Amino acid sequence: MWKWAKQISRTLSFRLSLMVVLAVAILLSLSLAVLFHFSRQALKQEALQSAEQTLESTVQHIDNILLSVEQSVGNIYWDMLAHLDDPEQMKAYSKRIADCNPYILNCDIVLHPDSVVPAEKVWTGWSREKTAIFSLPIYNRQGQCIGKVDSHVSIALISQIILSSKPSPNGYSTLLDSKGSYIVHPDKDKLLHQTIYTQTEGGKNASIKEVADAMVAGETGYKCFTMDGHENYVFYKPFLRADVPGRTSVKLDWSVGVIYPENDIFGEYNQLLYYVLGIAVVSLLLFFALCWLITHRQLLPLQMLTKSAQRIASGEWNEECGITQHSTLREDEIGQLQERFQQMQQSLSIHVSELEQLLKTLEEHGESLRKVYGQAQEADHMKIAFLHNMTNQMMEPAKAIAASVERLCQSESQERTEEYRDKCAQEVDTIKSQSKVITDILNQLLDAADKERGKEEPHE
């Protein structure tokens, strides 16, 4: 692995292609990041608008159901006032109210002065059967409140109607009252036995508690919460009834919400992101391969020049540069480099040839000098031997002269007799003869030196 990486690091075409692809990858990543950032914002904005429309349509749908119940009761109310004294007629009117509106399960007409009667027509809390109750006070001709009409509306039926129009494939709508109880919810168990705070008991699911507090408080907006390990977005707003003449203005303190799973909002976006990333990676790989092929082909002359330089460095001066005829037609920097390399190779070949010729000449002169030097050494040896021989020959005469001089010095104090004079003459003759021998030897040395000098002058 290390050798492969080292080989790649030495390949110029690979490194150039990698740098180009890295630069393109950085620019592409920045472009995609900006694109997907704004796309995500646009999707979130679109989801917010869709949730606003769904919330508005949900509110209108529920309000239409409630208004139809109120109108159904109000239409029969005035006929009922004329028969307040007839209990059988009250039962008939009760059945008639329940039959004229499909959302009303049953209707109770209570005529008792001691009963708890609302001051005005109003929607009250839930009964044991999980129904919403629309209470309408009954006044006699004297203006006294003598009873009420309670119309029970099925919450399950309202839930089915509202949930039939799903905001997204996995989304749903919900409706809460002021205590967090579900009025509309797709899960029947939660609808009948739980509130929104049931899921936050024990301090768990703090995100749901934030959503519940915001909806119960009558706020408008959206939040993100986690349920069953999945991220969800909830868009909520207060439930506001339409302003219709003759309708009570009492607020219900309900809050409607639309839940979108994150996958419903960003599912296609995430898939598109994965597709784009996959296409981008494959495209970068193909782009890298294309860049490598192009740069490798464009840099082939450099590889040839490198091989030629290696052969020249190994001593193959006359090796032809491996350049094809097509590549020599190039006029770019590589072509100029090839031309300069050829000129350099030719100049090197010429200089190397001249150096080889000069080296050959120097070798010949060196051989001649070695021969002359050998002869000079031999002559020096002969001269030394000759000098030794001559000096050995001069030793005897010199010793004889020295002995004669010594004897003359010793006999100088003796009487100068005839015998003494003869002896001195004899010693002088000896000195002369020995001096002549030395002089002859020295003359021979001088003659030999003159001859050698005469031989050396022509060589010089």
Image: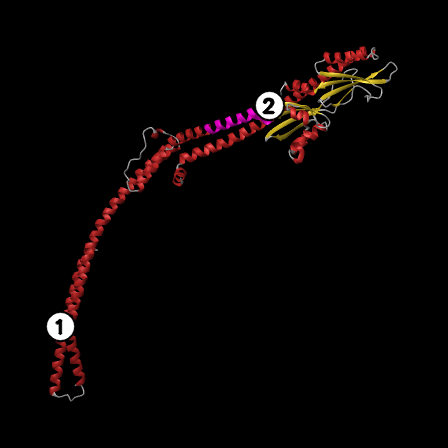
Q: Is residue 230 left or right of residue 193?
A: left
Residue 448 x %, y %: 16, 64
Q: Is residue 449 visible in this depiction of the protein?
A: no
- Tell me which amino acid carries mark 1: Val
Inter-mark Cα distance, 1 to 2: 144 Å
Residue 307 x %, y %: 33, 37
Q: Is residue 334 visible in this depiction of the protein?
A: yes
Residue labelled with disc 1? 437
Within 10 Å of disc 1 (Cα), the crowding (few <14, some 14-19, many 20+) is: some
Q: Work out whether residue 353 or residue 65 is closer to the camera in this orientation and state it.
A: 65
Asked whether residue 289 is drawn in magenta, I would say no
Residue segment shown in magenta? 261-282
Of the residues tagged 1 and 2, which is closer to the observer?
Answer: 2
Within 10 Å of disc 2 (Cα), the crowding (few <14, some 14-19, many 20+) is: few
Residue labelled with disc 2? 170
For mark 1, give the secondary structure.
helix
Q: Which mark is residue 313?
A: none
Q: Work out whether residue 17 or residue 317 is closer to the camera in this orientation and state it.
A: 17
Q: Residue furthest bottom?
A: 415
- Quadrant of residue 33 within the rendered picture: top right
